[in-house]
Every structure is written in C-alpha cells, then in structure tokens.
Image (cartoon, grey):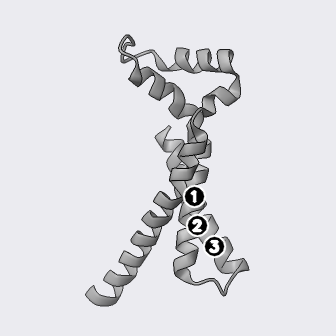
Amino acid sequence: RDASFYAVFFGGYELNCYLFRTYVPSMPDELNYFISGGLAGMGGWLFAMPFDVPKTNVQSRYDTKVVGSYVPEFIQIAKQRGFLGLYAGLGPTLVRAFPANAALFLGVEMGKKFFDKFLW
C-alpha cells in the first residue's frame, strides 16, 4: 500500500510540476507547488485505496490474526461488494487529500527556498 502510494504521490508531484512549468509558464511557483501537491495526494490515494480498505478492515476487527488476514479480506470485499467496494470512503479521503498535500508540498518547497537563500 505504501510503496504504490508513494510512487504515484512523488512521481505525480514531479510530473505535475513539470507539466505546469511547461504548459503554463506564467503560473507562479507557489501556485504550481500547491496545485501539484494537491493533485499528487489525490492521485496517490486513488491508486492506494484498494490496498488500504482491506488493511483498515483487518486492523479494526478484534478477532483477526495479525498475519494472513489481508488477502482473504481483500478477496471477500471484492466478492461481496465488487471492485468498487475496495474504494469505500474514497470521497472523504480525496476531499482531505487535496488541501493536506497541497499545504505539505507548498511548505516543503518554500522551506527549501528559504534555507537555500538564507543559510547557504
């Protein structure tokens, strides 16, 4: 779950930054970081959500064993609710993902600029 999320998250961020710089060169850097970060967070969750839902179900039940419960849970959700059942809770997750990750990347990029300017 984490590997797939971070591959899409960081890859999507870099790709979006590049595309905005290339096709919207007048966009301020800060807006680029903000929008690219928000979209990257949403893309990461779109990709990782099917792996997260079974994990959450297993962790939230008191009667599951630690090892060996994930794959059966994944299959059970897919059989009972279909593939879209693996996306339970996606709406609120995406609503939270955009502002949280937009602020994250804006803060990181502005922090990098600050430290590059004043400390080196």
SS class, disc 1:
helix
Nearer to us in this view, 16 or 94: 94
- Point out residue 37 in the picture as x, y percentages from the top left corner: 53, 64
Residue type indicated by callout 3: Tyr
* Residue that sits furthest to the right in the current view: 23
Identity of the residue drawn at 39% across and 24% down: 59
Between the C-alphas of marks 3 and 1, the distance is 13 Å
Numbered badge on residue 40: 1
Considering only order in the chain, which callout, 3 or 2, is on the residue closer to the N terminus? 3
- Point out residue 29 in the picture as x, y percentages from the top left corner: 54, 81
Considering only order in the chain, which callout, 1 or 3, is on the residue closer to the N terminus? 3
78 relative to 99 in the view: left or right: right
Q: Residues within 10 Å of mark 3 (few under 14, many from 20)?
A: some
Vertical placement of residue 13 versus 70, above or below:
below
Vertical placement of residue 17 versus 7, above or below:
below
Q: Residues within 10 Å of mark 1 (few under 14, many from 20)?
A: many
Residue type indicated by callout 2: Ser
User: Which quadrant, please, contains the C terminus?
Assistant: bottom left
- Point out residue 26 in the picture as x, y percentages from the top left corner: 66, 87
- Point out residue 79 in the picture as x, y percentages from the top left corner: 67, 15
Identity of the residue drawn at 57% across and 58% down: 40
Identity of the residue drawn at 60% across and 71% down: 17
Between the C-alphas of marks 2 and 3, the distance is 9 Å
The total of numbered circles placed on residues is: 3
Numbered badge on residue 18: 3
Residue type indicated by callout 1: Ala
Q: Which residue is mark 2?
A: 36
Residue 66 appears in view: yes
Residue 8 appears in view: no
Residue contact between numbered discs 2 and 1, judged by CB atoms under 8 Å: yes
Identity of the residue drawn at 47% across and 23% down: 57
